[in-house]
């Protein structure tokens, strides 16, 4: 782990600080350079679907940040089909030439299952909670 990774994990933890709901998340490092943005977008979709399969009790869709001025261009949300409520959110960050993805969702007892589902897709996932991270 590098100091830059440690800073990223600390920033991800800060995103989860107590708010209206308790959140947890993961940091996913990829090897996708900016020139492979379509592949990174596909990874975001596949990881988001894996998260939704574990934490959502119904179907969800992906809402892209570039569709709404309230969000940054690299920000995506998974939302429930039935009531348009938040399931997960992702920040796509270009760092040192490759993308890192920070996902978070409402806290459940299923964080280990989410990490396993992401790793089953071939990505390493570093779990984060408001209490810290685990490498």
Image: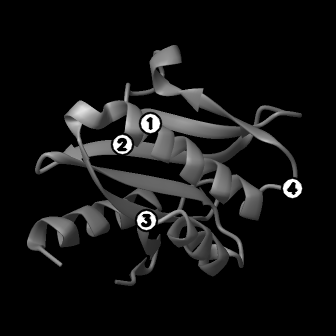
| Numbered disc in front, either 3 or 4 | 3
| Numbered disc in front, either 1 or 2 | 1
Residue, disc 2 = 92
- Name the residue: 54% across, 45% down: 89
Residue, disc 4 = 57
Q: Earlier in the sequence, mark 2 or mark 3?
A: 2
Q: Give residue 41's mark.
A: 1
| Numbered disc in front, either 1 or 4 | 1
Residue, disc 3 = 123
Q: Is residue 43 left or right of residue 98?
A: right
Circle 2: is it few (<14), some (14-19), or many (20+) Cα within 10 Å?
A: some
Question: Cα distance, mark 1 to mark 2?
Answer: 9 Å
Report which quarter residue 40 is drawn in: top left
Circle 1: is it few (<14), some (14-19), or many (20+) Cα within 10 Å?
A: some
60 vs 30, nearest the viewer: 30
| SS assignment at label 2 | strand
| SS assignment at label 4 | loop
């Amino acid at each position: 782990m590098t100091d830059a990774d440690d800073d990223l994990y600390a920033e991800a933890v800060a995103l989860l600080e107590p708010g209206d709901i308790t959140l947890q998340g993961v940091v996913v490092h990829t090897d996708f350079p900016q020139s492979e943005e379509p592949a990174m977008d596909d990874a975001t979709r596949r990881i988001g679907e894996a998260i939704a399969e574990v934490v959502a009790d119904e179907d969800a869709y992906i809402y892209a940040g570039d569709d709404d001025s309230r969000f940054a261009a690299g920000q995506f949300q998974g939302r429930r089909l039935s009531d348009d409520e938040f399931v997960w959110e992702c920040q796509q960050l270009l760092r040192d030439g490759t993308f890192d993805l920070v996902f978070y969702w409402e806290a459940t007892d299923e964080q280990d299952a989410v990490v396993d589902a992401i790793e089953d897709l071939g990505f390493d996932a570093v779990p984060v909670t408001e209490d810290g991270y685990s490498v």
